[in-house]
Image (tube, helix red, strand yellow):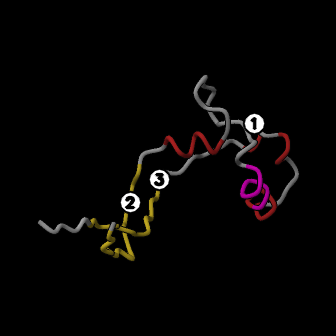
């Protein structure tokens, strides 16, 4: 009996938007005296190292806090399938 083995690979892009985080600027001395644009730029470049807005033993940074926020929108695009043979 002759056989052939094959499977399928799925690829796609995922877009996920989460609820926003609000911080009090006065809780972040590194932001004091900066313009709104400078604050946005600073946060964009440093959110991995900045402390979370709420203290928690599970959250080490603003990044961790943002990743824990509820998903408000999820979208899959560019779905493709491809057959592979062994």
* Mark nearer the viewer, 2 or 1: 2
> Sequence order check: which comes first, mark 2 or mark 1?
1
Mark 3 burial class by Cα count in 10 Å: few <14, some 14-19, many 20+: some
* Mark nearer the viewer, 1 or 3: 3
Q: Is residue 37 left or right of residue 79?
A: right
Check disc 2 and report the residue beneath it. Answer: 73
Circle 3 sits in a helix, a strand or a loop, which is it? Answer: strand
Q: Residue 80: x and y, percent?
A: 34, 76
Q: Is residue 86 left or right of residue 18?
A: left
- Give the spatial CA distance, label 2 vs label 1: 29 Å
The label shown at residue 18 is 3
Quadrant assignment for the N terminus: bottom left
The label shown at residue 78 is none
The label shown at residue 27 is 1
Q: Is residue 19 left or right of residue 35?
A: left
Mark 2 burial class by Cα count in 10 Å: few <14, some 14-19, many 20+: few
Circles 3 and 2: CB atoms closer than 8 Å: no
Depth check, front residue: 37 or 59: 59
């Amino acid at each position: 009996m002759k056989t052939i083995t094959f499977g399928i690979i799925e690829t796609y892009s995922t877009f996920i938007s989460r609820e926003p985080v609000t911080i009090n600027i006065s809780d972040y001395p590194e932001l004091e005296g900066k313009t709104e644009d400078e604050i946005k730029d600073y946060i964009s470049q440093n959110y991995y190292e900045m402390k979370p807005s709420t203290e928690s033993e599970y959250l080490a940074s603003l990044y961790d806090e943002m990743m824990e926020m509820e998903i408000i929108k999820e979208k899959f695009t560019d779905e493709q399938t491809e057959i592979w043979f062994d």
